[in-house]
Image (tube, rainbow, N blue to C red):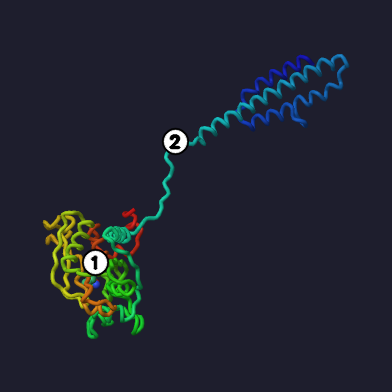
Amino acid sequence: MSDRITQLRTDFDRELPAVTTDADATALRDRWVGRKSGLLTAEMKTLGKLSPEERKTAGAQLNELKGYVESAIESLQAGFAAKREAEQLVSERIDVTLPGRRLSGGHLHPITLLRQKIEDIFVSMGYEIEDGPEIETHFYNFDALNIPENHPARSPQDTFYITDQLALRSQTSTMQIHAMQKRRPPLRVAAPGRVFRRDTPDATHNPMFYQVEGLLVDRGITLGDLKGTVEEFVRRLFGPETRTRFRPSYFPFVEPGAEIDYTCFKCNGAGCRVCKGSGWIEMGGSGMVHPNVLRGVGIDPEEFTGFAFGLGLDRLCALMYGLDDIRLLYENDVRFLEQFR
Ligand code: PHE
């Protein structure tokens, strides 16, 4: 029996190196010490046939071998587990010093950015920013602005009518009336907002666009104040070298009225692609508030005078960013908008 047990140990030692996986280890354990068909388990059962003397030694030897087999397999399994853990530590390693992934947040529309910049300039010059209705009665759209009964601006060809009494405002000049009704002079108000005209959309036109209106009313205000204010305004917007020029023009709600041009922000007046070689860019209309308009809101034109000017945001925005089609500003294609992040 003793020889047999020595032989069994040799056999086991020979099988041990072939074990390379957990499954191998389990199979080896079943084969040697499995409860049902383990080699050593079977050996134990033969002990009963031996004499008491022999049984004692053989039993001890068998138990010793069993312990040896079990602990050899256990230490193999422990080795596998340690190796698995080491591999996992490598494969799941996280470099905590790497920069995090940036969340892509929203951002403002280019028109909004420009509007805020312009609002800041107005505020820095003592103006209050005011918001008003986009749908107006004839009173605000036309009558109060001294627009005569037969004026083409009243025609449904030019204005979007909602009913025969209500229409979408076609200019922010309606805000002049709201501002003067709300407060007494001296007053300074700037009103940015959307306006609507029945234009066919193309590269330079859209039926909805943005204007900003500036209005100042006080005692002794002259055309010189208008010119000085507009010049200071464009200098704050485009830089201190910017110059302006006024071309006489007609708007029913001002007298005298003028179109304002400023020297091109790109070439500073030399002539370039942005200003189409002229050196000048059109800014918008302006003028001294018409006495009829002042009277219409109960302000005495003998005591107070004022000026107003309006500028278009969209065309300015398109020029500043070199857009060849103004409609890009309204389509809200994120591939376009992302550039203004
Ligand atoms: N509202 C005029 C326009 O849309 C511009 C303007 C504003 C003219 C203020 C005079 C005074 O063309």
Q: Image point 86% across, 18% down: which residue?
A: 50
Ligand 1 is found in the corner quadrant, namely: bottom left
Check the picture and name the quadrant holding the N terminus: top right
- Ligand 1 closer than 8 Å to the CB at disc 1? no
From the viewer's perspective, is 294 left or right of 59?
left
Label 2 element class: loop
Q: For the residues marked 1 and 2, what is the alpha-carbon distance in whole angstroms? A: 51 Å
Q: Identify residue for label 2.
A: 97
Q: In this view of the protein, can residue 102 be seen by the observer?
A: yes
- Ligand 1 closer than 8 Å to the CB at disc 2? no
Label 1 element class: strand
From the viewer's perspective, is 84 left or right of 220?
right
Q: Quadrant of residue 135?
A: bottom left
Q: Which amino acid does label 1 sit on?
A: Leu
The 10 Å Cα crowd at callout 2, few under 14, some 14 to 19, many 20 or more, is: few
Q: Image point 15% across, 66% down: which residue?
A: 224
Q: What residue type is labelled 2?
A: Thr
From the viewer's perspective, is 238 left or right of 192?
left
Residue 16 image offset from top left, x and y in percent: 65, 23
Q: Image point 78% across, 17% down: which residue?
A: 61
Residue 90 image offset from top left, x and y in percent: 51, 32
Q: Identify residue for label 1.
A: 311
Q: Quadrant of residue 223?
A: bottom left
Name the residue nearer the viewer: 181 or 97.
181
